[in-house]
Image: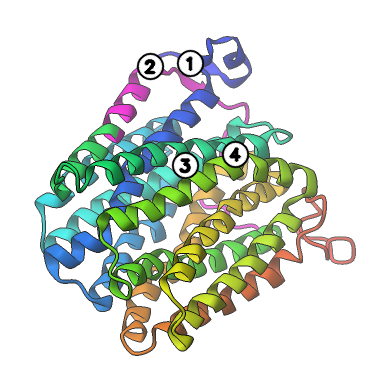
Amino acid sequence: MRYVPLAEARRLPFWKRPTTLLFLMAAAMPLAFATWSALLNNFVIDAAGFTGVEIGWLHTVREIPGFLAVGVIAIIIFVREQVLGLVSLALLGAATAVTAFFPSLGGILTITMLSSIGFHYFETVNQSLQLQWLPRDRAPQVLGWIVAIGSGASLVSYGTLVATWETFGLSYMTVYLISGGACLAIAIYCMIAFPQFEAPNPQVKRMVLRRRYWLYYALQFMSGARRQIFVVFAAFMMVERFGFEVHEVTALFLVNFLANMLFAPLMGRAVGRWGERAALTFEYVGLVTVFLLYGGIYYFGWGVALAATLYVVDHLFFALAFALKTYFQKIADPGDIAPTAAVAFTINHIAAVFLPALLGYLWITSPGSVFLLAAAMAGISLCLALLIPRHPAPGNETIFAAVLPAPAE
């Protein structure tokens, strides 16, 4: 195994550089996860007769590994982050590939747990590697391109699915095998083709909780709680209320990723120019509006065209979430990135463990109330985002730093 210091990696051919590896991983993950998400609601309804209660429990099970992402800290004592990330990506691909072999409640929950371990551990390590490998002055722009590449991979996958699902009478098994297998193949290629990159700052291999990161932790918690409502119930609404079929749900996802592919690089440049506070404020104001309109669909009977439009707009706002990563990159001690990425993922998933199942019961009595709750959460996130200074840095983590300096720990 070849080890290459990050400072020397720029001398490597483009196809062997750290940024290229990040791009490939960004393309591989959605091939499995996004396809799984696109088919999920139709698959669980067709194969196992899921209602809002079962879908809530499924997503609660799916989020348990996210809550336990802090375990990454213990694993990286023995396993390099780059290796752990690629092994986790391979697990996600393999589990997605065999999803349709288990068309029952117990089988779906089991395979979902396995794919979720792969997804959440990959995302935890991937976020850490991005912040360690990308220079601060270029991070927003490169992260925008990473989002765009992931969206482009999803665009190819979904475009193929929309064009062939009805034409060739594809089955859930065929699509899951192909998409999961492609993710697995890319992960194996990355294990073989790339050297191990050595970041200049050794990472702390223990849990890190610093009081001066409190705003980042709070924003992560609210982001996880709010996002779960969208992830679990927005697409489920399109199937349950409006009767969307697989190719129609996938077409909606297709539009989402096309929009992200076009706008994410522009968002990256905007974050670099205007700062994280402006970007996150814009995101949260937009999300409050979107969730209020979602609630109006149930309370006032607004139609499918509005619901589909809101779904696309919602995804665009969520694409700005990488501004939270760059905010942390600017305030963090370099050695804190890996352990804090794991802690932040756990914080992000605290509400995710119980919220989907709990709201599943609310959904069957008052679906509109679920989205009004999400609007309130987005409002709290907006208030927190306004506490970010224009130029965050160590010692300047919040707008209160000038009068109330944050402690070192």
Mark 1 nearby-residue class (10 Å; few <14, some 14–19, many ≥20): some
Instruction: Choose top left, top right, bottom left or bottom right for residue 263.
Output: top right
Name which of mark 1 and mark 4 comes first in the sequence.
1
Which label lies toward us, 3 or 1? 3
Q: Residue at x 50, y 63 (%)?
A: 309
Residue 195 shown in magenta = yes
Instruction: Choose top left, top right, bottom left or bottom right for residue 180.
Output: top left
Q: Is residue 193 above or below residue 46?
A: above
Q: Amino acid at mark 3?
A: Ser
Instruction: Choose top left, top right, bottom left or bottom right for residue 48.
Output: bottom left
Mark 2 nearby-residue class (10 Å; few <14, some 14–19, many ≥20): few
Q: Residue at x 37, y 67 (%)?
A: 232
Name which of mark 3 and mark 1 comes first in the sequence.
1
The magenta segment is 183-210
- Which residue is identified by label 3? 151
**Residue 2 visible at all:** yes
Query: Where is residue 213 shown, x and y percent of the image?
Result: 67, 58
